Amino acid sequence: MKLSDFERLSGAACLTGEHEDREIACGYTCDLLSHVMGRGQADMAWITVQAHMNVIAVAALLDFACVIIPENLPVDKAIIAKAQEEDIVIYSSDKTAFELVMLLGENGVPAAKKG
């Protein structure tokens, strides 16, 4: 699934503006950063309720396709600016994390490999 497909299917808003239409290789949902760092994979879609600078650092370090913030949780403008600087795509969705996981899975995105 490409990022454009995710946008169309989920109705999520891209907070970071124009971006490359990357392929989402796998998906993962977790809010514990050290856990994500140990299991993250390039081109992964990461669903998390966390919205702070360390999320952007982890996503950039591991070259994630995107970060998805569920339930329209707020994302500070400074976080969005840092994500743009690091070429990290951030989406905001009104769906729950569970609904987002289901959407990705139903559309062919596999779970990230177990560490």
Image (tube, rainbow, N blue to C red):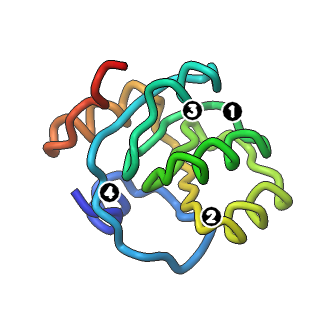
For label 3, count other residues whose C-alpha is less than 10 Å away and answer few (under 14), some (14-19) or many (20+): some
Residue at 68% across, 49% down: 56
Measured in 3D between alpha carbons, the distance from the residue under mark 3 to the one under mark 1, in whole angstroms, is: 5 Å
Q: Which quarter of the figure is the N terminus placed in?
A: bottom left
| Picture coordinates of residue 24, whole percent (x, y) | 30, 53
Cα distance in 3D space between marks 1 and 2: 15 Å
Residue 11's spot in the image, x, y percent?
Answer: 40, 57
Image point (28%, 27%), residue name? 113
Residue 114 location (% of width, % of height): 31, 19
Measure the C-alpha gap from mark 4 to mark 2. Answer: 14 Å
Disc 1: which residue: 50
> Which of disc 2 and disc 1 is earlier in sequence?
2
- 98 relative to 49 in the view: left or right: left
State the SS at label 3.
Answer: loop
Q: Amino acid at mark 3?
A: Thr
Q: Residue at x 28, y 56 (%)?
A: 9
Name the foreground residue: 52 vs 33. 33
Q: Mark 1, mark 2: which one is toward the viewer?
A: 1
**First of labels 4, 2 by sequence position:** 4
Instruction: Say which element carries label 4.
Output: helix
Q: Which mark is residue 48?
A: 3
The label shown at residue 15 is 2
Question: Residue 38: horizontal and vertical position, in percent?
Answer: 51, 24
Q: Amino acid at mark 4?
A: Phe
Q: Which of 89 and 107 lies nearest the eye of the viewer?
A: 89
Q: Which residue has dot 4 on it?
A: 6
Q: In the image, 80: left or right of 106? A: right
Callout 4–callout 1 Cβ contact below 8 Å: no
**As displayed, is residue 43 above or below residue 20?**
above
Q: Earlier in the sequence, mark 4 or mark 3?
A: 4
